């Protein structure tokens, strides 16, 4: 496959990876949990896109013409169309706002901070292809 086509299809060296997560929450702690996740994302210059329990976090216009990966769009659309689809958890992705890969070092640091801050069950996948 030619380089230009690989770039357009986000294949090979142009694949973008992020961190996926699912956090168990309830109505009482959903706002504090989302605030903690957003603070961690800000500290590492990442974006968190996702939501649950009727909440939705999407990148704002301040990020310019950022192309949001297809997996992230799918999750955001499912939450937007049916806000109760995730009624006991927050589902989302940490992505790099510049379309770059999140390094293993940053991924480990983000996960370590999440373990300290979150008082809930959560699952994390450190390396998820965002365009597959």
Image (cartoon, helix red, strand yellow):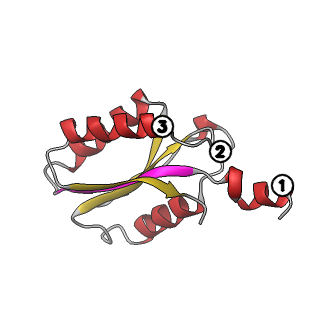
Please tell me how crowded label 1 is: few (under 14), some (14-19), or many (20+) other residues with Cα within 10 Å.
few
Give the x, y percent position of residue 32.
21, 41
Q: Mark 3 falls on what kind of element?
A: strand
Residue at the image position 49 percent from the left and 49 percent from the top: 18
Q: Position of 20 compared to 72: left or right?
A: left
CA distance separating discs 2 and 3: 13 Å
Residue at the image position 55 percent from the left and 58 percent from the top: 130
Q: Say if the magenta span includes residue 41.
A: no
CA distance separating discs 2 and 1: 21 Å
Whether residue 38 is visible, yes or no, is no
- Among the 4 quarters of the image, the one containing residue 41: top left
- Among the 4 quarters of the image, the one containing residue 79: bottom left
Residue range (magenta): 17-25
Q: Earlier in the sequence, mark 2 or mark 3?
A: 3
> Which residue has dot 3 on it?
46
Residue at the image position 70 percent from the left and 59 percent from the top: 11
> Which residue has dot 1 on it?
3
Q: Mark 2 falls on what kind of element?
A: loop
Above or below: residue 45 compared with residue 74: above
> Which residue has dot 2 on it?
66
Q: Say if the magenta span includes residue 23.
A: yes
Give the x, y percent position of residue 96.
54, 41
The quarter in which the C terminus is drawn is bottom right
Residue at the image position 46 percent from the left and 40 percent from the top: 104
Give the x, y percent position of residue 71.
53, 63
Q: Main secondary structure of the magenta part?
A: strand
């Amino acid at each position: 496959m030619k380089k230009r086509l690989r770039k357009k299809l986000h294949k090979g060296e142009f694949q973008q990876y992020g961190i996926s997560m699912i956090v168990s929450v309830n109505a009482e702690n959903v706002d504090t949990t989302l605030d903690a996740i957003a603070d961690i994302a800000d500290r590492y210059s990442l974006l968190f896109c996702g939501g649950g329990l009727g909440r939705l976090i999407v990148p704002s216009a301040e990020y310019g013409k950022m192309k949001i990966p297809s997996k992230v769009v799918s999750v955001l659309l499912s939450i937007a169309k049916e806000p109760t689809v995730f009624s006991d958890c927050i589902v989302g992705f940490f992505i790099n706002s510049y379309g770059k890969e999140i390094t293993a070092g940053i991924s480990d640091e983000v996960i370590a901070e999440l373990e300290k801050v979150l008082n809930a069950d959560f699952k994390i996948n450190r390396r998820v292809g965002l365009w597959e």
